[in-house]
Amino acid sequence: MDVFAGFHGHVLAAVQQLKHDGVVPQEASIDGITLEPPKDASHGDLATNAAMVLAKVAGKAPRELADRIVPLLASNPFIDKVEIAGPGFINLTLAHAFWPSVLRMVLEQGESYGRSAIGKGEAVNIEYVSANPTGPMHVGHTRGAVYGDALANLLAFTGHAVTREYYINDAGAQVDVLARSAYLRYREALGEDIGEIPEGLYPGDYLKGVGQTLAAEHGDELLAMPEAKWLPIVRGAALKAMLALIEDDLLALGIRHDVFFSERSLSAGSRDEIAETINDLKARGLIYKGRLPPPKGKVDEDWEDREQLLFRSTQFGDDSDRPLVKSDGSYAYFASDIAYHRDKFKRGFKSMIDVFGADHSGHVRRLKAAVAALTEGNAKLDIKICQLVRLFRGGEPVKMSKRAGTFVTLREVVDEVGPGPVRFMMLYRKNDAPLDFDFAKVTEQSRDNPVFYVQYAHARASSVLRNVREAFPDLDLGERALAEADLSLLKDEGETALIKRIAQFPRLVEAAAEAHEPHRIGFYLYDLAGDFHGLWNRGKDLPQLRFIYESDRELTRARVALVAATKRVLALGLGILGVNAMHELH
């Protein structure tokens, strides 16, 4: 149950009555009418702009129209007070009798609470991670991996049919560099002293295993082959090993993809999808031969001073037309990107989300232009940029990894602090803001560590339920049984504030899904945990507010219902973030 949606319907019913009475014209649009919590909680529980939206078309001052709306809203038995504020906003304070019904709904719905059908089963493709398959994932990949996975959870929770996809960049020059690096380790596995790793090759120890596997399978036969012959053999073995390594790294974070899509597959074999895509755009007059002017005030690695094949990207909002073929005749990376998104569209995805690192921010306009052109506006592409992660240990920067050679790996971070803290903290900032990750901070047991603070709330709630079983062994602690408790006994302002916070969850989930912002869930959980901890602490000072009140079974039952509902919402929110809720903290 979304509290706000229910009362929004009541506001619209009041507007309909004004239309019936001739106060507002029948044709007046209600699209802009909102009902939201006011910024200042002292102004009530909800605020609507209905009078402001309809005043002009009704030919009345907003406050005058608000005066007509107020008595219609006040007729609702669950609305305690209706007031006009400022130029014509209407603030609603809900009756105390309403809030127990919210708590009862949470307990009756259980795991379904907050779930939504706003997605209407729409097929959504989320492409995330897509790190070059040239080594283990580093901490920079971690943020995009966690963000993409949490967004997929969030959209699935709100009724979308989500496909989680990884785009394997296995067609570029970097995979040949990988093969040459693995070949060097192959020679090392055969007993050769390879010395220092040459500049331009991958230096990490993670390739030693690939070299040993090649030596075991091929002996020294690759040494006698020219590069043109051994390169594809070594490349295939190295790619297979690197993808297995990446999948294992992702699994450590609880991330599984539905589809691994090979870039090489677009132009390998009997069918060249990149050529088909270019021909498609040619047929629509969107490809031409021309010369691009040099970029002004910036360096563009794609710019070449020559006549070349160009996509009319500027017709779709880009700041420059884009080349599709390199001077050596091979496809530009952008051409593969266009073909890949065309493939997604042909697979039935009219809604696509790409999660990119900060180094790909310059690709946003061109890709959006390509999707608009290819689909003739029938698909939407949202590109989310995940900004950089800076690692610290007790305030000091962390820079090096022995395993990778030049960077800190995802696995090193997960192995040290655990997947839950990594996921939560990577989501405790909006994706487009830089993030500082301090190893000491995320293991600190204090309010300043959000993941501990939220997990501690869930563990405390679990502890209360365990203790209740000892005090009242015959009390049924199932959620549906607790929903039958006399919840009107919850009269303390702290109890009501906690219920109000719980009531926000469905609306917050929908808003986060529509904005593609899973970090909102993390912020909400921190606030929910704060309300719960605050109530717990008051119970330490005021025995009559304790959750377990041994002299009053019914009051205990009602308070335990509140604890169970809080625990449920904490677990649901953590689940969306992909974090396992803790029942005990050690």
Image: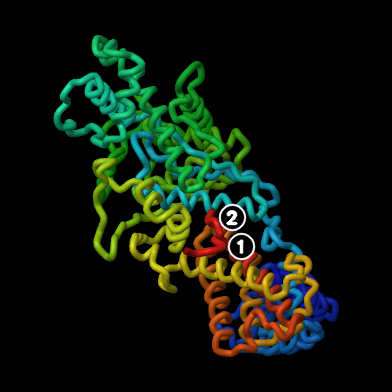
44, 254: nearer the viewer = 254
Whether residue 46 is visible to the viewer of this picture, yes or no, is no
Left/right of residue 46 with respect to residue 332 in the rendered view: right
| Image spot of residue 19 (x, y percent) | 81, 76
Q: Are marks 1 and 2 in contact (CB under 8 Å)?
A: yes
Residue at 64% across, 79% down: 547
Amino acid type indicated by mark 1: Val
Q: Tell me the CA gap for discs 1 and 2.
A: 8 Å
Vertical position of residue 127 compared to residue 472: above or below? above
Residue at 69% across, 75% down: 471
Amino acid type indicated by mark 2: Leu
| Image spot of residue 94 (x, y percent) | 71, 83
Residue at 64% across, 54% down: 157
Q: Name the residue beneath numbered marker 2.
A: 154
Are there few (<14), some (14-19), or many (20+) residues within 10 Å of tag 2? many
Q: Name the residue beneath numbered marker 1.
A: 509
Q: Quadrant of residue 66?
A: bottom right
